[in-house]
Amino acid sequence: MSAAVTTPARAASGRTASIVSALRRSGWTLSLLGILAVLVAITKAIQPTFGAAGIQGLAISVMPLALASVAQAIAVISRGIDLSVGSMMALTSVVSASLMEDRGEGFAVAVVIGVLVLGLVLGAINGTLIVVTRVPDIVVTLAMLFVWAGCALLVMETPGGASAQWLRGLTLGPLVNEWIPKAAVVMLLVVAIVWIPIRRSRLGLSMYAIGSDPLAAFRSGVSVGRTKILAYALTGLFSAFGGLSLTATTGIATPVPGPYTLMSVAAVVLGGVSLSGGRGGVFGPIVAVVILSLLRTIMTFLNVNTNLATVVQGGILVGVVMVGSLIQLRRKRG
Amino acid sequence: MSVAETTPETRPAWFRPAAWANLFRERPIVPLLVILVVLVVLSEVIRPGIVSLNWAGVMVRAAIPLAILAACQTMTMLTGGIDLSVGAVASMTGFVVATLVNGPGLWTGIAVALAAAAVAGLINGIGVGVFRVHPLIMTLGMSLVVLGLANVWQLAMVQTGAGVPDLFRRVGAGMVAGVIPYSLVVFVPVAAWVLVTLNRTGYGRLLYAIGDNPVAARLAGVKAWQVLIVLYVISAVLAGIAGFLYSGLTNVASVTLVDSALLPSVAAAVIGGTSILGGRGGYGGTIIGALILTVISSLLSSLGYPEAVRQILFGSMIVFVAAAYARVTNES
């Protein structure tokens, strides 16, 4: 748009400047990718047989947590936090698996669409409660964690259900080349198709605006309440994607929420999203998730007790958040 | 609406919402007691003959460990925090004592368990007070760490086996004449100490001050990080004591025993009128809150509702009650 009125030279310099600023903005993500490369090299050194099959397995195991961390990132960018992500995943997963059991492949398409709508609705309920009651996000979503988990238990008391074959096929196996896992491609496509248009729209801008300063956003004409509800609805939508990926990758559903909520918070912080909102994107957290799960893989190769691995993950969570808040304190003072 | 606003004096006091809001705000314990009585009456109506002295004793016995866990939430919430590691810490202490009782002895076990709890609380306090990590994330992370370490301990202790000590069973589950629970021996001093600390000591004032207005507290010379470190250690030790009572009450030694009491402990404090934003509330309301939750639980299970319904109900209650308190306190 502005290129039409500026000279070509100024447009070119503007373009380099925008490339530099884009690099600076994604500096955190790029350094995460560097860490990831180092970790892959370490894994390869420890376990020389780690190859295409290992990457397949990694992509499949990472998928639900990556989608959960995208969901969490959207809530955190809008200066919220959603502790019910794990429960919403469990609820959407059991609903999808119980509806798809003993039904046709075509019916499953309707189920998937219905479950995604369900995710939007769950998230919108969270957001509406936060906006209407003015109770802090953390309290409302902590309470909703138990409400949605209870609903999941009502749908299905013990693990069960089934997944449609085409849905399973979306996540299993490679694509084109044996080194490119289908699960990773599908996950990135889903995130890109849903998130990038929103990020570039008025809604995306409003979400970052209410995240960095709600009062300033309000005074610039952003409807804070509505944006917040929509952000939580998106969080619910990505939780539903996460729940579907649980059903698809395991073939069944479990009514008890996994550790996704906590790990998603860790991944979001590690992925460069500020817990005070308005800063970061969704791709940093995805890389962070891969790093976290590669660390676990390395510990398995080193024969570390899995319980100790849990301890290490809790320690990483707390450590990352500590460093993150230290940086924030510095920034405030400096 | 407008009629009510122009002629408020024509209505009796009990009919004015503002008067109720005032009562709710100033003395939340009165409406809470009314709710408790209503619930007891409701239990008797739904299940005639259920309410008796023995029933009351059983309710109090079940509410005591919950009320101690809720003391952790009340004290941390007064500073604007929360302690979500109490479930893991309480399970851990009960389990550690159960594994040590046959070897090094009961009192060594208790000392080791409480020391481990205090270390967890110390790290929580350092994270929250010094590094300014959000309490919720700090304590959730700590609960992962404690659970993982407890699992490692469990694997190491597979050979020894575990048994809940007799003393815990007697104190946690025993009743004098089938009416008065033994656990009052633990609860009365703990509750008295918490009430006195919050209402009558300088330390208690500091907790309210930090939660009410952290900036003002800092300008007045309060070293918040010291207060918070002590607070989270107290919280973890109280959780440890509650863990002893839980293991005695259920006669189970498990590293996840108390997890299901985590949400009710937050719910008890919120229902009791303690604001999660800090600065408002007290332990008296929390104790009634714990009793209310216990009576509701027993009512639900006597009607044959599954655990899921209890979770949904408690979660909804937290939102509803927190919203009600937020509304009442914003009106002034």
Image: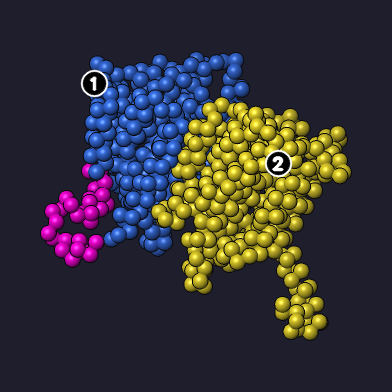
Chain colours: A yellow, B blue
Q: Could you say where residue A203 lies in the image, as x and y percent from the top left?
A: 59, 63
Q: Chain of mark 2?
A: A
Residue B8 is one of the magenta-drawn residues:
yes
- The C terminus of chain B, quarter of image: bottom left
Q: Could you say where residue B269 lies in the image, as x and y percent from the top left?
A: 36, 42
Q: CA distance from mark 2 to mark 1?
A: 55 Å
Q: Is residue A124 visible?
A: yes
Q: Is residue B87 above or below residue A214?
A: above
Q: Quadrant of residue B216?
A: bottom left
Q: Is residue A36 left or right of residue A280?
A: right
Q: Secondary structure at mark 2?
A: helix
Q: Secondary structure at mark 1?
A: loop
* 2 and 1 marks in contact (CB < 8 Å): no
Q: Residue at x 48, y 72 (%)?
A: A219
Q: Residue at x 36, y 39 (%)?
A: B268
Residue designated by label 1: B49
Q: Which tag is nearer the camera, tag 2 or tag 1? A: 1
Q: Is residue A76 left or right of residue B71?
A: right
Q: Could you say where residue A134 lies in the image, as x and y percent from the top left?
A: 41, 56
Q: Is residue B12 above or below residue B244?
A: below
Q: Is residue A247 left or right of residue B88?
A: right
Q: Amino acid at mark 1?
A: Gly
Q: Quadrant of residue B246?
A: top left
Query: A169 or B327, which lies in front?
Result: A169
Q: Residue at x 50, y 61 (%)?
A: A226
Residue designated by label 2: A62
First to last magenta residue range: B1-30
